[in-house]
């Protein structure tokens, strides 16, 4: 307390207006001069600085441990520790600690500490403890600032519309913001952008506000802002390249698809055109399958594309049962037919689910119950 | 005299809280103790009285209250009468209370206090937020998660400085129940300024201002006045510290 008083006196003595006041008071020369210039720091900032320092020390320690561990690992693998990369580390770990765990996150790993420990938020307030963001106390400043910005844009568009109406200028019908083929930023991406958790209700608020902004007649004025929060809808089929047709020595076009998988069955399917609709499976006809159901499976892509009388199919299939084999061939036919039809039908095939690989496999039987899910008859005693 | 005493009381409280939780030394050492006292004793150091006239209030429809049936009896002293079943505020009283509130606001801004604006209701939310941003202060116009003041260190994950003055542009929330932040401010000894309409309870507000809290014209007038008061306080601080 005395120290503070002295500090104040010192500062007063610098002020020319206060010299008279100071001359009346005894000036203690032993007071440390740094104190007078010391900035006022709030408790909040002090606590933050302490935590930041602790965190830095912790990270430095972990980093050191990681470097040493990496060198040991390199020596164990008989490699040069200086040129041992992160990729080598990952390979060494999966070699030394083979893990059958399904969940990748649960397998042993050795990564730099920056990737393992979560990033910390920087201080959100200054030395006096004043928050930087004007919506800090809402707890979600970035998200609410976004909503604020949307309203700001809405007002801007409305003002512009009023001005145009006053001048009785008609809107150019060609200048319309076309939003079909775009979708709003999804919730996860928005959360990442705001660095804040957003609940479903708040995300809907965001979408509603954006829709409202987009529907305004002059919304093209704020196109940049809207585009910042929308993503183009990609046509799914465009992500896969359709292979070029091949020709045999007779000039017949054909496509062979290898590795057609379904359950435990594996097939390779060759579709050739022109043809008469002849189907050969392991040297037999469609009678290879006894069930009508399986035969229908095979024919579905051919009938869907209306090519069942124009192409020949040759399939070699092994493993699994009839349903799995039929499914594998069906997928192979559909996958091959993409080269024989136009883009529009490919998109239709995708929507019909013909181009989607069926990943379902048999679920194992569990001890203590009759099947995968089925339970034994329950008897009280 | 009453006015000055009240100002002193709240400022002392603000200062104590700053000492306790946020700031360790007094806010500014270049302003002497004598000068501080002089400023606090001055009846209207920031000249906030000339910010508005009673006519301005009338033009902004501040005198319109709610229907008689919803009158809160604590508001009776501020009521002039009723017309066509609606209460009408006495604008002379309102002006007096509003000037007190503006004076306190300017003083808090002058001493670098944190000021937090509150408002519930979609119509004027944006206006209030913009006001807060333009005068470099803070706004909370959204759903009030409980414990922002009373459990701040947990909610923000760190020691957090709380506001020194809360300004409520309306004191009721969306479902016409008193805003929880009023109670929480009282718990944390944070001074409050609030526009209280004829259906509100002024008891928990440190500086109530009787007046219409629904019309856009009235809210925009309040926003303009509080912004001007805050900016005057900050401007004065710059001048005095030179």
Image (spheres, rainbow, N blue to C red):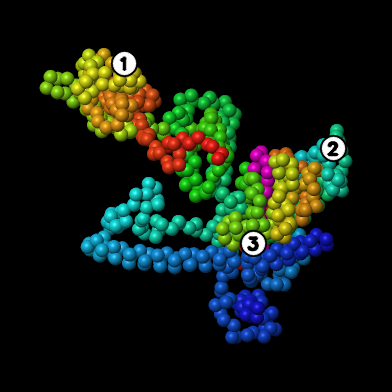
Magenta run includes residue B48:
no
Which label belongs to residue A306?
1
Quarter of the image with the N terminus of chain B in it? bottom right
Q: Which residue is mark 3?
A: B112
**Tag on residue A269?**
none
Q: Which percent across, then down, holds residue A314? A: 22, 23
Pointer 3 or 2: first along the chain: 2
Mark toward the viewer: 3 or 1:
1
- Considering every residue shown, the one lying at the far front of the view is A381
Q: Secondary structure at mark 1?
A: loop
Q: Which span of residues is magenta-colored?
A: B111-125
Q: At 64% across and 45% down in the image, what residue appears?
A: B143
- Residue sitting nearer the eye, A326 or A63: A326
User: Is residue B28 shown to the viewer in this render?
Assistant: no
- Mark 3 or 2, closer to the camera: 2
> Circle 2: is it few (<14), some (14-19), or many (20+) Cα within 10 Å?
few
Whether tag 3 and tag 2 are in contact, CB under 8 A, the answer is no
Task: Decide if residue B123 is in sight here.
Answer: yes
Quadrant, the C terminus of chain B: bottom right
Q: CA distance from mark 3 to mark 2?
A: 42 Å
- Position of A200 with respect to A68 (left or right) is right
Q: Secondary structure at mark 2?
A: helix
């Amino acid at each position: 307390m005395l120290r503070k008083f002295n500090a104040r006196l010192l500062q007063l003595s610098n002020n020319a207006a206060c010299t008279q006041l100071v001359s009346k008071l005894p000036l203690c020369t032993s007071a440390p001069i740094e104190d007078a210039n010391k900035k006022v720091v709030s408790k909040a900032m002090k606590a933050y600085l302490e935590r930041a320092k602790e965190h830095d020390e912790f990270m430095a320690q972990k980093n050191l441990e990681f470097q040493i561990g990496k060198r040991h690992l390199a020596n164990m693998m008989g490699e040069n520790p200086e040129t041992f990369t992160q990729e080598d580390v990952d390979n060494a770990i999966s070699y030394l600690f083979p893990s059958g765990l399904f969940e990748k996150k649960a397998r042993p790993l050795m990564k730099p500490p920056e990737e393992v420990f979560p990033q910390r938020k920087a201080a959100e307030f200054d030395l006096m403890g004043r928050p930087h963001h004007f919506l800090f106390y809402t707890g979600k400043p970035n998200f609410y600032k976004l909503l604020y910005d949307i309203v700001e844009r809405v007002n801007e568009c409305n003002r512009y519309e009023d001005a145009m109406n006053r001048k009785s200028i008609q809107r150019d019908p060609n200048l319309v913001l076309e939003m079909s083929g775009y979708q709003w930023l999804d919730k996860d991406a928005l959360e990442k952008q705001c660095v804040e958790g957003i609940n479903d209700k708040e995300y809907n608020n965001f979408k509603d506000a954006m829709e409202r902004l987009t529907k305004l007649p002059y919304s093209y004025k704020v196109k940049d802002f809207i585009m910042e929060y929308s993503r183009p809808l990609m046509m799914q089929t465009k992500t896969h390249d359709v292979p070029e047709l091949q020709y045999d020595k007779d000039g017949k076009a054909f496509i062979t698809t290898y590795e057609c998988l379904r359950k435990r069955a594996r097939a390779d399917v060759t579709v050739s055109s022109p043809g008469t609709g002849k189907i050969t499976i392991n040297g037999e006809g469609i009678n290879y399958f006894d069930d009508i159901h399986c035969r229908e499976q095979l024919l579905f892509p051919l009938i869907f594309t209306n090519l069942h009388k124009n192409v020949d199919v040759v399939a070699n299939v092994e493993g699994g049962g009839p349903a799995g084999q039929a499914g594998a061939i069906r997928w192979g036919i559909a996958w091959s037919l993409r080269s024989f039809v136009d883009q529009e039908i490919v998109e239709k095939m995708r929507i019909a689910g013909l181009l989607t690989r069926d990943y379902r496999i048999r679920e194992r039987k569990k001890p203590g119950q009759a099947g995968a899910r089925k339970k034994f008859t329950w008897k009280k005693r | 005299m009453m006015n000055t005493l009240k100002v002193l009381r709240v400022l002392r409280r603000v200062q104590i809280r700053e000492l306790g939780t946020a700031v360790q030394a007094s806010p500014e050492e270049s302003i002497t103790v004598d000068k501080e006292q002089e400023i606090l004793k001055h009846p209207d150091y920031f000249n906030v009285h000339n910010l508005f006239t009673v006519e301005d209030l009338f033009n902004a429809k501040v005198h319109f209250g709610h229907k008689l049936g919803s009158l809160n009896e604590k508001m009776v002293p501020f009521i002039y009468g009723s017309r066509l079943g609606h209460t009408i505020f006495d604008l002379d009283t309102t002006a007096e209370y509003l000037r007190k509130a503006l004076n306190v606001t300017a003083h808090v801004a002058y001493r670098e206090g944190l000021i937090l604006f509150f408002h519930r209701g979609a119509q004027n939310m944006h206006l209030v937020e913009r006001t807060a941003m333009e005068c470099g202060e803070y706004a909370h116009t959204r759903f009030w998660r409980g414990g922002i003041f009373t459990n701040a260190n947990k909610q923000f994950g760190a020691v957090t400085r709380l506001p020194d003055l809360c300004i409520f542009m309306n004191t009721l929330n969306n479902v016409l129940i008193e805003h929880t932040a009023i109670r929480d401010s009282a718990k944390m000894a944070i001074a409050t300024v609030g526009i209280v309409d004829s259906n509100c309870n002024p008891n928990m507000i440190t500086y109530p201002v009787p007046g219409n809290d629904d019309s856009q014209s009235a809210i925009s007038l309040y926003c303009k006045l509080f912004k001007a008061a805050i900016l005057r306080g900050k401007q004065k601080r710059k001048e005095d510290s030179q």
